[in-house]
Amino acid sequence: MEHILSGLAVVFSLKMILFIFAGTFVGIVVGALPGLSATLGVAILLPVTYYLSPVEGLLLLLGIYTGGIYGGSIAAILLNIPGCPASVMTTLDGYPMTRRGEGGRAIGIATLSSFLGGTIGLFSLIFVAPVLAQTALSFGPTEYASLALFGLSAIVMVVAKSILKGFIGVCIGLLVATVGMDPMVSVPRFTYGSIELMAGVNFIPVVIGLFGFCEVLTQAMDTKVRIAVRQRVSRVLPHGNDFRVILHNFIHPSWIGTLIGALPGAGSAIAAIISYNRAMTMAKKPEEFGTGIPEGIVACETANNASIGGAMVPLMTLGIPGSSVTAVLLGAMMMHNLTPGPMLFVNNASVVYSIFIGMIVANFAMLVLGLGCAKLFPHIVNLPRSALLPSIAILCVLGAYAMGNSFFDVGIMLSAGIIGFLFKEFGINNGAVILGLILGPIAEANFRGSMELSGGNLLVFITSPISAFILLLTLLLILFPVIRKVVQRKFQKNRNSHQSTCC
Amino acid sequence: MKILKNQDMVVGVFFILFSLFILHEISLFQQPDEKVRAIGPTFFPNVLSYSTLVLSIMLTAKSFFSPSGPVFPAQFFSKKSLFSAGSVLAGVLIFITAVDMLGFLAWSAIFLFVLQWILGEKRLKINILISIGFPLILYLLFSVGLGVILPSCALFK
């Protein structure tokens, strides 16, 4: 109870409220701009938080995350271009409403749905996380090494377009993480005599490069002329029937979003797709989905914001990020000497509850800013790329430089940006690479730690029941596409033979 | 060249060569004085390099039987898009190289003005406003607000 009161005292100060609102507003703007995403916003502003207290820094970034996921719906509704991957399904019903002159109404529905979904997700986080953290107290290095492998496999299996290239990306990230002095015996690895490299590759410039500068190059390559939004946004506040539709339809998408968000590798985009498909399947008139109905917007926007709370559960309790954004947030926590995992709830409980309460405030800020600033949204999505791209490029340079006042880090950022761009073009997922980079030290330290404790006996990963269970889940995850193909082929064969018998 | 019509083959071959290079580099690691550790410093890099090698071989083999798309899709890599991305990259490289000479504020303003012009912003007033306003905001945020020491003009040092 005292941690909750301490959290309330920390969060409800003018400075903290301003940070949360500022972060949420930046997130909405970044999310609303097509091509940019919450991940980019969090990555670029990560170095700024170095100079803030842990709670201030994390709440600024979480505000960007919350605002960014919601902000994607604005471009989806007004431009028929999803501002971020989580808003792909919102285009299906949001844009038709804009074409009917109801853009403001669609934004209002999206805003309230996002708020309600976010609230359910956050309360799930607040009640589930401490319980899971308590369970995870019994985890040792063996279990953590297995969890790291599960987390890395999950993001590849779910997100990567090609599983082989996804695992190659993970291996590259893990290899980059080995650069520097070996943590146990102080032997230099891949340092080539460089003093800067002896400290290892700082993940922050790599994050900024892979998600920030890479996106600048990608956007610069895209020379398509964008159609500007000419429509004025009005009548934003949901009322009457829209309000009833939202209240009637937000519960199931909220649970779907929270559960999907909690799965490592899955994220808000998958939550929105599954929720939309479920809503369409269960609807009395499924043919109306895609024509511009409120139910379509409610299904996606509730789920994608609910997934935020869900995604924070494995991050905070186990230290396993489930997506690119949470991977960057993991890096931010470690930068502030907060090691995610069960000990976070023991050693830094007041910080944890400050984060929980701050996220509730950020969710509320998203509602207020979303409804209050709706008239600005057409101007935001119309911001010219010719101004945006150089500005983001400068922010990337400055962010990489600010960490250590070193141009070496800027060089790392540029290299990561160019390599990230090439990886993207060649189908290698940058999220898998960054997850490998961030989880690499955790995976290696825990693996080698368990080997030391067991005297080099690999069977320890199977004799530990929790580790064995996690490894079994990992194996099932990797084999799932093969199993699914076999089952589908058998089903098709049975169906064909049944049809030929009938005929 | 036929190989450029198959993206996965390019990726596979590149990472085969990359893995072999990394394995060679690992063989040059210093060996630790103490021999009592269960796992040495080369274990993890070796596992990762061999994994990358195996995955790359699988990818290359797969690309023989089911070729993927061309490496450089023509409609994306047009002259205009290459010029646009190249300008951004060159601009950033020049910015980093010369920022110490003129300092962050002045160089950012020049960089923003030139790059906006190249990317198509021909409205002079808007261009100047953003070129001066944005670096000022960043300077206030980073230098004044957060205490980050930004590069200052070498002429005044």
Image (cartoon, rainbow, N blue to C red):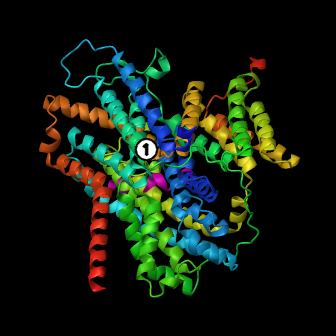
In this rendered view, identify the residue nearer to me: B126 or B57: B57
- Location of mark 1 (residue): B64
In the picture, measured across the screen, residue A255 lies left or right of residue B134, that is left
Please give the chain letter of the residue carrying mark 1: B
In the picture, measured across the screen, residue A22 lies left or right of residue B124, that is left
> Can residue B16 be seen by looking at this rendering?
yes
In this rendered view, identify the residue nearer to me: A281 or A298: A281
Q: Which residues are magenta?
A: A1-16
The residue sitting at 36% across, 58% down in the picture is: A262
Residue A194 is inside the magenta segment = no
Looking at the picture, does residue A275 appear above or below residue B70? below
The residue sitting at 52% across, 41% down in the picture is: A423
**Rendering coords of residue A472 (x, y %):** 21, 51
Residue A7 is inside the magenta segment = yes
In this rendered view, identify the residue nearer to me: A374 or A393: A393
* SS majority, magenta: helix
